[in-house]
Image (spheres, rainbow, N blue to C red):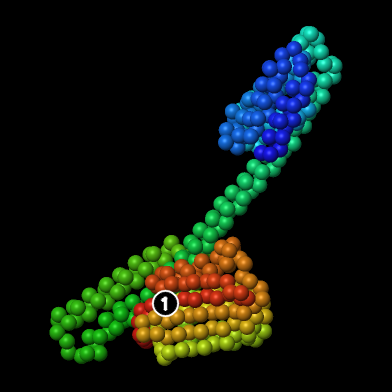
Amino acid sequence: MAAVLGLTCAAAVFGHAHPGPFPPLALILTAAATAPLLVLWRWPLAALALVVVADATFVVWAQVPWPPTVVAAWLLALAACPLVLPRRPAVVLLIVTEVAVLVAVLVPSSINPRPWDAPITEALAVLLAWGGAESLRSRREVERRRVRVADEMRDLHERAAIARGRAEIARELHDVVAHHVSLIAVRAATAPYQLGETSEATSAAFAEIATEARAALDDLRAVLGVLRTADGQVPQAPQPCLADLSELLQRLRSNGMTVARTERGVPRPLGAAVELCCYRVIQEALTNAARHAPGAPVEVTMDYRDTEIALTITDSGQTVHQALATGGTGFGLIGMRERVAALGGDLAAARLATGFRVEATIPVLTTGRVS
């Protein structure tokens, strides 16, 4: 703003010191060709249009003194057109300027006594000012599009990761539920034989329970049909539980990772779904620690409470988990949150001064495992 104000004052002094046939008109045009730039950011179209029209008058009517400071303001305004105006009005102002330069070539020398090559210089100056600004605008637009496409791709990847994670969780929970329902069906079918003499109503009730349990299994298999892997196969490996955690930690230690395990409260069997969730959360958190903070010691804490189990996995590595903490490609963290949320729990992850911490609280759905 101070620079534009200086240009205006200098142009006014120049116009006053070089009186032409119409000095008042020269002063008015000088002000109109510079002062509007002071309000460019508030009224860009009106300001630039006034500057361009005033300078077009200078270009055509060369008898009116055209101060160098006004020329500088003119080129500045032309450079601002593609940067601050929509495409159509910016192009219109460019056309107005070039038409003024063309008219200056055609008018009689009594109106425009400047040398014949002056309009050529002016036309080239216009193209240079406009072209430089247009190039900058294009680069900015390309960068905005690149950022927008990157955001859209990241959103798509995140949604795909969530979908894959939910499908995997659903498959694993199916295995857990199917196991218990199968036991119910078997127990209901064999109970009358184990109890010996039973009433007809009791036998009918057991038969109904077995029938409903088998129907529930059929429904589960139907639901699982939409959660198959890409090759149409359903994973058949047994699902891990907390009893398998020692093997996981030992495997990581054999690979050079320092992992300490601490248990608080009274360790006890939990529901199969809860134990599966705990195992996966600890497994994913340790995998992230090995990837983002290799060589850093990791502490795994399991706190058995009355109605919930709390997990804390902390590493003290010097390398900060940038991808996880900034929402980058930390899709494993998304999967952990989905698993914990599916069981009504909460999960939080946070950067430390050096390292990373994952905390999960999962309600205890059952107090023992059916066998």
Residue 357 vs 55, above or below: the answer is below
Q: Which image quarter: residue 114?
A: top right
Residue under the image location 54 percent in, 55 percent down:
156
**x and y, in percent, of residue 72 in the image:** 75, 31
User: Three-letter amino acid code at disc 1?
Assistant: Ile
Residue under the image location 68 percent in, 34 percent down:
5
Q: Is residue 114 left or right of residue 6?
A: right
- Report the front residue among 19 and 261: 19
Q: Which residue is mark 1?
A: 362
- Taking the image as drawn, is residue 81 in sight? no
- Taking the image as drawn, is residue 317 in sight? yes
Q: Is residue 60 left or right of residue 229?
A: right
- Report the front residue among 328 and 180: 328
Residue 43 vs 332, above or below: the answer is above
**x and y, in percent, of residue 30 in the image:** 70, 24
Q: Is residue 270 left or right of residue 63?
A: left
Residue under the image location 30 percent in, 78 percent down:
185
Residue under the image location 39 percent in, 72 percent down:
344
